[in-house]
Structure formats: structure tokens, C-alpha cells
Amino acid sequence: MPVCLSTSVATAALVANAFTLGWTHSIERVRWEESWRVEGEVLVLEAVRVRGHGAGMEPPPGAVLQDGVWVWRPRTRHARLRLTRSEHTADYDWCDETGACRPMAAVLPSDGGVTELRPCTIADPAAPGPPR
């Protein structure tokens, strides 16, 4: 099922059953990764991996330290994600199911505000259509 990424000026649709978002915490400079799965009309947060801890990044009860990385499995369900993308911090990384990663700007350039991610269909009016 496609995942639609939208800013105030553009939308992109990517076919993805699962993906990982990665970024570096702007204050603590610690790598954070979240693995997501598309399940019908929701996104399921399968796993979180944090390479350290600090302000606002304390691992929850049940997290396990594996090779210096805190790992936990929230399995929470979300209709959409809202990612703040600022010119003052590094952008998110988008990693596909094969593990290949690229800056999110290569998928959808930032407008300096919020990028929304949600499951969508090819017929979704917010998804890009064929060239006219």
C-alpha cells in the first residue's frame, strides 16, 4: 500500500509495506530510528532504536539495551505522522524495506514546516496523479 508524504506545497506517494525513519536528536546528538509497518489505514510503530539516552529520550520500562542501542516495541497505531522538518536541524532519513536509506529531501523536499505521512491509495485525491 502506498504511503503519502505531504507538505504545504507537494505530495509524494511511495509503495511501502514497511519503512524506517531515522534522525539525530537535535540536542543530545543521538541517533534515533523508528520502524513502521503499514496496516490498512494505519501506521504501526513496530520498534524504536535509540543509540543512547538523554533529555527527553529516556527508554521506557521494558526497553532492552542491545549492543549499546536501547530497543523497545510500542506497536502503537497511528492514522498519520506529523514530522517537523526544520532548516536548523538535519533532515530525516527514509529507509525502505531493503534497508536502503536516503535523506527524506530526496523523497519529498521540505517546505520548512511539517511533513505528514499516512497510508493512502493510488486513487487518493491527495496522491499525485498521472502527468497531464
Image (cartoon, helix red, strand yellow):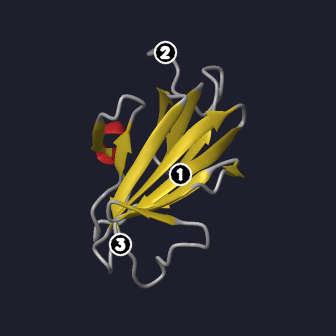
Q: Residue 96 has which mark?
A: none
Mark 2 closeness class: few <14, some 14–19, many ≥20 residues within 10 Å: few
Q: CA distance from mark 1 to mark 3?
A: 15 Å
Mark 1 closeness class: few <14, some 14–19, many ≥20 residues within 10 Å: some
At label 2, the amino acid type is: Pro
Q: Is residue 63 above or below residue 53?
A: above
Q: Which residue is mark 3?
A: 52
Lower sequence index among marks 1 and 2: 1
At label 1, the amino acid type is: Ala
Q: Which residue is mark 1?
A: 47
Lower sequence index among marks 1 and 3: 1
- Place of residue 5 in the rendered image (x, y in percent of width and height, measured from the top left): 50, 41
* Tag 3 secondary structure: loop
- Nearest to the eye among marks 3 and 2: give it: 3
Residue for point 59% across, 54% down: 73
The residue closer to the viewer here, 38 or 127, is 38
- Place of residue 7 in the rendered image (x, y in percent of width and height, measured from the top left): 48, 49
Residue for point 32% across, 79% down: 28
* Tag 2 secondary structure: loop
* Tag 1 secondary structure: strand
Residue 62 shown left or right of residue 76 in the figure: left
Q: Please say whether residue 10 is visible from this viewpoint.
A: no
Q: CA distance from mark 3 to mark 2?
A: 44 Å
- Nearest to the eye among marks 1 and 2: give it: 1
In the rendered structure, are the residues bearing label 1 and label 3 in contact, judged by CB atoms less than 8 Å apart?
Answer: no
Q: Residue 130 has which mark?
A: 2
In the rendered structure, are the residues bearing label 1 and label 2 in contact, judged by CB atoms less than 8 Å apart?
Answer: no
Residue for point 61% across, 35% down: 38
At label 3, the amino acid type is: Gly
- Place of residue 93 in the rendered image (x, y in percent of width and height, measured from the top left): 33, 49
Quarter holding residue 87 = bottom left
